[in-house]
Image: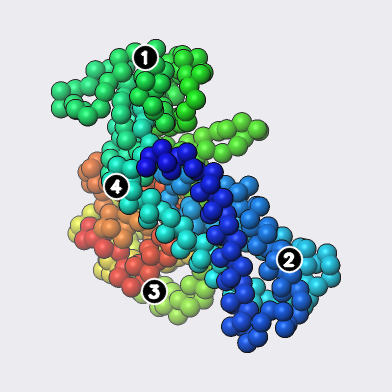
């Protein structure tokens, strides 16, 4: 069965192309029947023309858009996104053709929308059926690919674990090469150990290996050069997965830079176009919040004036995006006092805090003026909380990844805060945990994640009993 599937891959691909085109034709025709209540040849002719043009384009273009290459190791979300974009591109090409023949105005937009959605659903369900069948075979040891891993550091070990855990992907690690001997507690009885790099090519030929995974660190440039020469005649798939796990960076995204492949190590997900959308949302949200909360803000201002003499607002310099300094605004919750060049975090029963200020800090209402910072573009609604400059100078010396949290705008609320890591950080461990949550947020950011944090903060406030 292993050889049967691999030897007939071209026939399987042709079959999938035919099924895709046929399925899209059927979904287009059926949605026409449901929408127009009549057959497509009884409505404006452009609809039938578009049906034939787009299904023909799908047959030829889908293969060029990489829809029929191996799906092993790809995420479900990535596959669905690729299908959605490819199918949309085909329909746009069909619409462009309709524009050229001056019939685009006769097309029913509603029918086209129905066809896109039903066609996309068919493409996803068809691939789910194919993948489920392949998963069924692979879990029983069929249609597997034999693999050799070169480099057995943290990345190589993690790749091996994932290959074992995701047995449906159909990868079987037959051998590894490690420059260092494996410790006694890491013996792999079913996996052979290739002693020298020079033996890899012969092993690949002798054991019918399908893929070689190179998991060497970037620093192993000498070994990589040797491998390039030693594997020059190896007619198998070779993947290089650089061992970057030991590097405390925000991302490992590979892209094109001046025509060269480049790995972005320090670029947050929320940068670029996503960052522009997030910034627009932040400013609109801040403007709406300030408008709706204006009666409450006036009441708090009056309460501060009544509780103790001094200004309503308190401002203090903070580090913002990429370390740029700005003044953060808060409602004043302490009596006027001298800092003497040192910023002390508020503690339990801190005599500097007024009774009204204690209420503001407990309920986080003292943070509301920071919507002004968001409106000015210095902060975001969601992001790592900004710390005093003196604290940044202190913690960046003892926590390796501390300053990475300044690669995004600081926020009014954040992932760390809704998990209870707010307020006083009187130990290094507490600050380390907060930074850990901040970096997790930066590395896994999404609009959905921001929405969850905002809803949690709005409904439940910040958790934790260490806010004084």
Q: CA distance from mark 1 to mark 4?
A: 30 Å
Residue 215 in percent (x, y) is at 39, 28
Position above or below: 129 against 387:
below
Q: For numbered disc 4, what is the local secondary structure?
A: loop
Q: CA distance from mark 3 to mark 4?
A: 63 Å
**Disc 1 element:** helix
Residue at the image point whose x is 31% and y is 18% from the top: 194
Q: Residue at x 60, y 49 (%)?
A: 63
- What distance separates the C-alpha of mark 1 from that of mark 2? 56 Å
Nearer the observer, 400 or 425? 400
In the rendered structure, the answer to whether residue 112 lies left or right of residue 167 reads right
Question: In front of the other: label 3 or label 2?
Answer: 2
Q: Is residue 215 left or right of residue 182?
A: right
Which callout, 3 or 4, points at the residue further toward the start of the chain?
4
Q: Local crowd at mark 4 within 10 Å, few (<14), some, or many (≥20)? A: some
Q: Which residue is mark 3?
A: 300
Task: State the residue at coordinates (36%, 75%).
Answer: 303
> Circle 2 is placed at which residue position?
95
- Position of residue 183 relative to residue 422, above or below, is above
Circle 1 is placed at which residue position?
Answer: 199
Q: Nearer the viewer, residue 237 or 404?
A: 237
**Picture residue at 45% right of the left edge, 76% below the top:** 293
User: How would you rate the neighbour count of disc 2 (Cα within 10 Å): few for under 14, some for 14-19, many for 20 or more?
Assistant: some
Task: Please state if 129 lies on the left or on the right of 372 as rendered.
Answer: left
């Amino acid at each position: 069965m292993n050889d049967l599937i691999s030897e007939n891959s071209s026939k399987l691909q042709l079959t999938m192309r035919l099924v895709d085109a046929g399925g899209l034709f059927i979904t287009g025709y059926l949605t026409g029947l449901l929408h127009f209540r009549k057959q497509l040849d009884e409505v404006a002719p452009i609809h039938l023309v578009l049906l034939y043009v787009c299904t023909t384009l799908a047959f030829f273009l889908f293969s060029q858009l990489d829809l029929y290459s191996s799906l092993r190791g790809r995420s479900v979300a990535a596959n669905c996104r690729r299908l959605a974009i490819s199918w949309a591109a085909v329909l746009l090409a069909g619409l462009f053709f309709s524009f050229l023949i001056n019939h685009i105005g006769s097309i029913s937009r509603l029918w086209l929308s129905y066809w896109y959605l039903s066609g996309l659903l068919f493409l996803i369900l068809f691939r789910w059926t194919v993948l489920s069948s392949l998963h069924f075979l692979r879990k029983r040891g069929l249609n597997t690919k034999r693999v050799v891993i070169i480099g057995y550091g943290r990345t190589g070990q993690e790749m091996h674990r994932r290959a074992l855990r995701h047995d449906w992907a159909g990868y079987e690690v037959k051998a590894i090469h490690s420059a260092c001997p494996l410790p006694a507690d890491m013996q792999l009885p079913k996996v052979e150990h290739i002693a020298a790099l020079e033996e890899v090519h012969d092993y690949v030929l002798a054991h019918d290996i399908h893929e070689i995974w190179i998991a060497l660190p970037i620093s192993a440039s000498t070994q990589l050069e040797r491998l390039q020469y030693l594997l020059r005649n190896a007619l198998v798939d070779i993947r290089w997965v650089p061992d970057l796990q030991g590097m405390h960076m925000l991302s490992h995204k590979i892209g094109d830079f001046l025509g060269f492949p480049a790995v972005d190590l320090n670029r947050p997900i929320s940068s670029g176009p996503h960052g522009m959308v997030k910034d627009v949302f932040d400013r609109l949200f801040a403007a709406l919040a300030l408008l709706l909360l204006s009666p409450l803000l006036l009441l708090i201002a009056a309460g501060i004036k009544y509780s103790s003499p001094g200004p309503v607002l308190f401002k203090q310099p903070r580090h913002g995006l990429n370390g740029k300094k700005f003044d953060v605004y808060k409602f004043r919750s302490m009596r006027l006092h001298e800092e003497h060049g040192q910023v002390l975090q508020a503690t339990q029963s801190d005599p500097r805090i007024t009774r009204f200020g204690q209420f503001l800090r407990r309920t986080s209402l003292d943070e509301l003026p920071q919507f002004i910072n968001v409106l000015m573009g210095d902060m975001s609604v969601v992001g790592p909380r900004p710390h005093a400059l003196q604290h940044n100078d202190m913690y960046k010396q003892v926590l390796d990844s501390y300053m990475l949290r300044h690669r995004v705008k600081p926020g009014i609320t954040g992932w760390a805060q809704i998990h209870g890591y707010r307020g006083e950080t009187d130990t290094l461990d507490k600050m380390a945990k907060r930074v850990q949550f901040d970096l997790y947020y930066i590395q896994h950011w999404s609009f959905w994640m921001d929405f969850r944090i905002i809803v949690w903060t709005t409904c439940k406030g910040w958790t934790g009993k260490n806010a004084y």
